[in-house]
Image: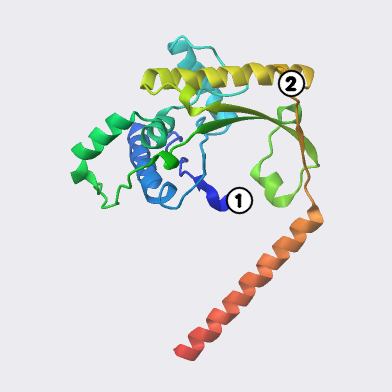
C-alpha cells in the first residue's frame, strides 16, 4: 500500500525558514513530482499544508487572518498554498490544447537547472481526487512522537472525518485555488468546534461517522525495539569481521 504513496518533502517548505527557503523548496517539490511521482507510478500524494504544530502556528495564523480580513481559526491554522499550486500546475487538470502548445514551445526544457529530466505527464498521471482528512483527538490532545515511539499513552479513540472532492472542483487560478483551500480549513475549524462541543462531527445526509481505535501495545513495542537493537548489533559485528578480514 505505502509503496504507491509519494511522500513529498514539505518540511522545509512549510517551516519558518523564510521566503527564500520556501521558494527553493517549491522548486524541489516540482523536481520531486517529475523525478519520482510520475516515473514511479505513484497513486497517492500526501500534502500537509498547515506547516507545523498548531501551538506554534496558531498565533501567526491569526495575525495573518486579521491582516487579510480572514476568520481567526482556533482549532487549525490557515494553510499555505504554495505546494498546492505547484501540484495543481504539474499534475492537476489542464486544457489539452494548451498542454500540447506548451509542450511544443518548451522542448528545450526537457532538463532543468539541476540536470533533472522533466517527464511529461499524461492523462493517467494526473490527480483526479482530493481526499480531505480532519482528525480529532480526545480532549484536544494529539498523539506526539514520544507517545507513538514509546507507547506511553493509553489507548484513545481517534476520529477521522473524510471528504472527497473531484479535482475539477478546485479552481486552477492562484487566487481561486488559495481561497478554495482557505474555505476547506475554515470548514475544518467549524467541524472541530462542534466535535469538541458535542463529541461528534457534523453529518450531512445519511453519511455515517466512523471512529478509529488507536491502541498502543507496550509488549509489541518492546519486542520490536529488542529486535532492532539485536539486528543493529549483529550488523556491527559482521562489518567488524569483514573489516578485520580485508584490512
Q: For residue 163, what is the image quadrant?
A: top right
| Neighbour tally class for label 1: few under 14, some 14-19, many 20 plus, Cα within 10 Å | few
Say which of 61 and 210 sits in front. Answer: 210
Q: Disc 1 to disc 2, how far (Cα)?
A: 32 Å
* Secondary structure of the residue carrying numbered label 1: loop
Q: Measured along the vertical axis of the image, is residue 151 above or below residue 102?
A: below
**Farthest top residue in view:** 69
**Residue 35 horizontal/vertical position (percent):** 37, 50
Q: Measured along the vertical axis of the image, is residue 111 above or below residue 74?
A: below
**Residue 95 horizontal/vertical position (percent):** 34, 28
Q: Is residue 202 left or right of residue 172?
A: right
Q: Which mark is residue 196?
A: 2
Q: Which mark is residue 1?
A: 1
Q: Is residue 12 visible?
A: no
Task: Name the residue rendered at 54%, 49% in the picture.
Answer: 4
Q: Is residue 221 left or right of residue 24?
A: right
Amino acid at each position: 500500500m505505502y509503496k504507491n504513496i509519494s511522500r513529498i518533502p514539505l518540511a522545509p517548505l512549510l517551516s519558518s525558514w523564510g521566503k527564500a527557503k520556501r521558494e527553493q523548496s517549491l522548486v524541489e517539490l516540482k523536481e520531486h513530482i517529475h523525478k519520482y511521482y510520475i516515473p514511479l507510478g505513484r497513486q497517492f500524494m500526501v500534502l500537509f499544508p498547515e506547516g507545523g504544530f498548531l501551538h506554534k502556528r496558531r498565533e501567526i495564523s491569526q495575525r495573518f487572518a486579521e491582516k487579510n480580513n480572514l476568520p481567526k481559526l482556533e482549532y487549525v491554522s490557515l494553510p499555505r498554498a504554495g505546494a498546492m499550486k505547484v501540484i495543481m500546475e504539474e499534475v492537476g487538470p489542464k486544457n489539452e490544447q494548451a498542454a500540447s502548445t506548451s509542450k511544443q514551445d518548451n522542448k528545450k526544457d526537457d532538463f532543468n537547472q539541476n540536470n533533472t529530466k522533466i517527464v511529461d505527464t499524461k492523462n493517467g498521471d494526473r490527480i483526479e481526487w482530493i481526499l480531505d482528512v480532519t482528525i480529532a483527538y480526545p480532549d484536544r490532545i494529539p498523539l506526539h512522537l514520544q507517545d507513538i515511539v514509546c507507547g506511553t499513552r493509553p489507548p484513545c479513540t481517534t476520529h477521522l472525518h473524510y471528504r472527497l472532492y473531484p479535482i475539477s472542483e478546485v479552481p486552477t487560478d492562484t487566487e481561486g485555488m488559495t481561497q478554495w483551500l482557505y474555505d476547506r480549513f475554515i470548514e475544518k475549524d467549524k467541524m472541530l468546534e462542534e466535535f469538541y462541543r458535542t463529541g461528534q462531527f457534523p453529518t450531512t445526509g445519511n453519511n455515517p461517522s466512523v471512529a478509529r481505535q488507536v491502541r498502543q501495545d507496550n509488549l509489541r513495542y518492546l519486542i520490536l525495539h529488542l529486535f532492532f537493537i539485536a539486528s543493529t548489533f549483529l550488523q556491527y559485528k559482521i562489518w567488524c569481521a569483514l573489516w578485520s578480514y580485508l584490512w
